Image (cartoon, coloured by chain):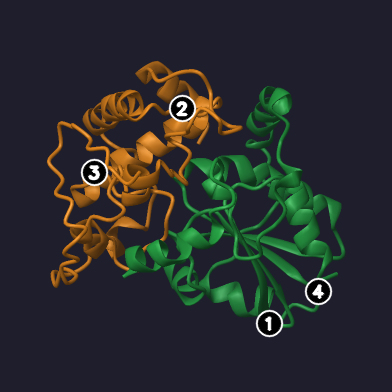
């Protein structure tokens, strides 16, 4: 079963996976982004929250029983959306984030998620996963509450 | 490039379909998985433990002296601020640091603060735990694994 689950989101991210274009030659912005942990904008958090709810429903997956995990990942995606222009997976290390965004493989939903429902970030969990909760919704309040002490 | 490599390595660990983050090159036994009924109390513990930071950070300038030149084995957790599974494994590492005090040094590397170290050791998926001994990387465990998996890994090098 390799049918890719296409996400319908309000941000426009191109998935140029099969063609593997050469990495972008524009200078990496990573150096200026890593020096401080910046809170993502409310707008991006809301976009990624809605995307996550919608994609969980479409893919038949569930959020972690600890919504703190869900919330942190959503904020990480939002932060990357703010700084890189695309929701690059926050649970990976990249030598060049800008180049990874261009390649598209790890833009959420990443290729392993779309093809095999594998989300190592634990944002989208299949029902049989030991960490899977029963919900496909997460509110802004939950996100605020569970990430308040970070 | 990273994406290509990942595609190649995934089928090797296909024996654990429900827990992709559990996979590691060492193919640790899945027998030590959490019991589902214990999960809620586990997460309560995690939330409490998040406020306690027992494991010091190591950065580029201290990597050589604290990790590579250390006389005892060293466990290093590579993490990132917006990584969800890292929230699960932080308190486990804190606990291991206490449990093996005097026998094992434990450090955390924020891959955003020290991208050079992460790149040097080929870190891709986060969290990743590595064990070093005599300046050499000895083992790697990827993902938020149960504590027993890390116990087994550590004890090989004590």
Badge 3 and badge 4 in a common chain: no
Disc 3: which residue? A81
Please identify which colour was used for chain A in the image.
orange
Marks 1 and 3 belong to one chain: no
- Does label 4 or label 1 sit earlier along the sequence? 4
Letter of the chain that mark 3 sits on in the rendering: A
Instruction: Tell me where residue A87 sits by quadrant.
Output: top left
Q: Which residue is mark 1?
A: B135
Label 4 to label 1: alpha-carbon separation: 10 Å
> In the rendered view, would you say B50 is above or below B89?
above
C-alpha gap between disc 4 and disc 2: 40 Å
Using the numbered discs, state the Cα–Cα distance from disc 3 to disc 4 in whole angstroms: 42 Å
Dot 2 and dot 1 within a common chain: no
Residue B50 located left or right of residue A77: right
Residue B16 rendering spot, x and y as whole percentages:
58, 48
Rendered position, A19 above or below B81 = below
Classify residue A53 by image quadrant: top left
Q: Which mark is residue A63?
A: 2
User: Do tags 4 and 2 sit on the same chain?
Assistant: no
User: Mark 3 vs mark 2: which is more N-terminal?
Assistant: 2
On the image, numbered disc 4 is attached to which residue?
B72
């Amino acid at each position: 079963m390799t049918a890719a689950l296409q996400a319908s989101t309000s941000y426009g991210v191109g998935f140029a996976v099969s063609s593997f274009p050469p990495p972008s030659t524009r200078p990496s912005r990573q150096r200026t982004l890593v020096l401080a942990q910046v809170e993502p904008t409310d707008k991006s958090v809301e976009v990624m929250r809605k995307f996550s709810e919608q994609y969980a429903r479409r893919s038949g997956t569930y959020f972690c029983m600890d919504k703190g995990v869900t919330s942190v990942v959503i904020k990480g995606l939002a932060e990357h959306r703010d700084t890189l222009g695309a929701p690059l997976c926050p649970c990976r290390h990249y030598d060049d984030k800008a180049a990874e965004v261009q390649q598209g493989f790890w833009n959420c939903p990443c290729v392993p998620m779309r093809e095999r429902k594998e989300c190592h970030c634990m944002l989208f969990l299949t029902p049989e996963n030991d960490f899977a909760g029963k919900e496909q919704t997460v509110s802004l309040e939950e996100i605020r509450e569970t990430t308040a002490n970070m | 490039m990273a994406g290509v490599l990942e595609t190649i390595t995934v089928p090797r660990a296909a024996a654990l379909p429900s827990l992709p983050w559990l996979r590691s090159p060492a193919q640790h036994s899945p027998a030590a998985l959490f019991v589902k009924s214990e999960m809620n109390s586990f997460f309560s513990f995690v939330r409490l433990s998040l406020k306690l930071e027992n494991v010091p950070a190591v950065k580029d300038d201290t990597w050589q002296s604290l990790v590579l030149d250390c006389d005892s084995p060293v466990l290093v957790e590579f993490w990132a601020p917006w990584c969800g599974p890292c929230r699960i494994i932080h308190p486990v590492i804190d606990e291991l640091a206490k449990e093996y005090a005097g026998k094992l040094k434990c450090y955390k590397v924020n891959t955003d603060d020290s991208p050079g170290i992460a790149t040097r050791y080929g870190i891709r998926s986060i969290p990743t735990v590595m064990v070093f001994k005599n300046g050499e990387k000895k083992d790697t465990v990827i993902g938020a694994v149960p504590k027993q998996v890390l116990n087994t890994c550590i004890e090989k090098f004590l």
